[in-house]
Image (cartoon, grey):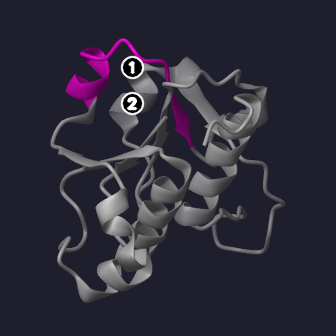
Amino acid sequence: MKIVLFQPEIPQNTGNIVRTCALTKADLVLVRPLGFSTSSRMLKRSGLDYWSSANIEFIDDLSEYLRSSSLPFYFFSKKASKNYASISYSQNALLIFGSETQGLPTWAWNLWPDHFYNIPCAPIARSDDSGCLNLSNAVSIVLYEALRQQGFPL
């Protein structure tokens, strides 16, 4: 499996995801621009010594990456209506998550509207009337469901 982070902004989230990827043997794809330097002390600290165990790739164009790939892919957004647990995940799926503040780009919704899924959350009293999970938590939830369906091939 590959976790794809579209323009992540918070180094601690990405560091936690690096750790999760290392421990699950999932690859990590980071789509530039990033909201931090990969040499950031906070990024390294949250990833601890797992950086050397994770397979990390950097790309500049998510659209081109997806168009040139034959792998199944899924976007995860609080705005989607289909539940992440309804997917039958394959071992080589691309699991795509948006940035912490901007989410996924409009062009992705326009090109692949049937590829969007959500993680159900209860509504809370906020200005936009909806809560959302921390990025690293959302990645863990989806990745572990996909691995569960595969019999945890760790």
- Say what amino acid the circle numbered 1 marks: Leu
Which quarter of the figure has residue 18?
Answer: bottom left
Q: Is residue 86 above or below residue 26?
A: above
**Residue 111: image tag:** 1
Image quarter of residue 143: top right
- The quarter of the picture where the C terminus appears is top right
* Residue occupying the point 15% across, 42% down: 60
| Residue 4, x across and y down, in percent | 39, 43
Amino acid under disc 2: Ala
- Residue found 77% across the figure and 26% down from its top: 86
> How far across and how far down the image is residue 53, in percent?
36, 59
- The residue nearer to you, when weighing 18 against 109, is 18
Q: Furthest residue to the right?
A: 122
In the rendering, at what x and y percent does residue 9 appear? Answer: 33, 68
Q: Position of residue 6 (x, y in %)?
A: 34, 49
- Residue underneath mark 2: 108
Q: Are marks 2 and 1 in contact (CB under 8 Å)?
A: yes
Residue 68 colored in magenta in the image: yes
Please give left or right for residue 29 compared with residue 82 in the image: left
At x 25%, y 27%, the residue is 65
Read off the magenta span.
Answer: 63-76
Most foreground residue, 114 or 45: 45
| Measured Cα–Cα span from mark 2 to mark 1 | 5 Å
